[in-house]
Amino acid sequence: MTDHQTTHQAQEDARNETIRIWLNGQVVPKGDAKVSVYDSGFMLGDGVWEGLRLYNGTWAFIDEHLDRLFEAAKAIDLDIGMTRDEVFQAVLETQKANDMHTDAHARLMVTRGVKTRPFQHPSLSQQGPTVTIIMEHSKPKIARPIRLATVPHLRGLPMTQDPKLNSHSKLNCILACIAAEKAGADEGLMLDVNGFVNTTNACNFFIVRKGEVWTSTGDYCMNGITRQKVIDLCREDGIPVYERNYSLVDTYGADEAFLTGTFGAQTPVGEIDGRPIGNGEMGPVTTRIRELYKSLIQRNCS
């Protein structure tokens, strides 16, 4: 399909060729930002991360992002080796080094660090964590509503790999994305272990039915910060919103559908499994939610 796009598609920006990256206490040129082949993240996907967005000189909802980062690190018994304030100062240092003021995206990553031998046991990571901040000039550029395809890959149970964990181990989601692309779609719509609609491989998922906004229960998906902001905004604005189980039948019959995430905020969905959703364009409820979210950003990032 010639017009394939992703939910993280951004405008080309030549400045990203010369960005500087924070790596273990130093801000270095992009070409010099390298980690060992023995690093736990490279070798095993052993690490956690956060995506951050810069609006008007302010990192949106930074406290919630740092809460989630430190909670995830605790869950996998990973000592970041820095305080919350030190992590935030590293973000600000990277921002300053790149002279960024708005429309920037940061990926903050922490792995268990370099291993002494190439095996799984965490005790082999003895040199301390690897902390990296990649910061790019990044303005979303979505040419049309996203096309989804339902994939066989599930968002699983907490006792396998908890979907609430923002870990470096993303292979399940990558396979879901590949399956969707093979089906001619942009992104994969993933079900939970009970067969209910859950999320996509990269974003949280919402539908709109008769003026009501529905999203999953949150039991089997990353409980996204943008997802929660949308739920809160709906409640404040009097838009009925429900966290509930619903099926593909409910989804195909929806009037609107959209995705949420730190990068794209709210991205309209026009087609699922070859079926148009509504008229295939962004609907009035999604448009209203977008307006509410922009106002929230203006209040918080001015």
Image (cartoon, grey):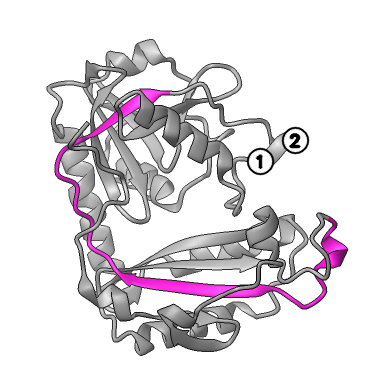
Say whether marks 2 and 1 touch (CB < 8 Å): yes
Q: Quadrant of the C terminus?
A: bottom left
Residue in the image at 75% along x and 35% along y: 159
Label 1: element kind: loop
Q: Residue at x 35, y 31 (%)?
A: 181
Q: Give the numbered dot on residue 159.
A: 2
Q: Quadrant of residue 209?
A: top left
User: Magenta stretch containing residue 148, yes or no?
Assistant: yes
Give coordinates of residue 233: x percent, y percent. Answer: 32, 47
Q: Residue 270: x and y, percent?
A: 21, 28
Number of on-image labels: 2
- Residue range highlighted in magenta: 121-150
For label 1, the residue is: 162
In the rendered image, residue 64, in percent from the top left (x then y), is placed at 50, 62
- Name which quarter of the figure residue 273 lies in: top left
Q: What residue type is labelled 1?
A: Asp
4 or 136, which is in the foreground?
A: 4
Tell me if residue 279 can be seen. yes
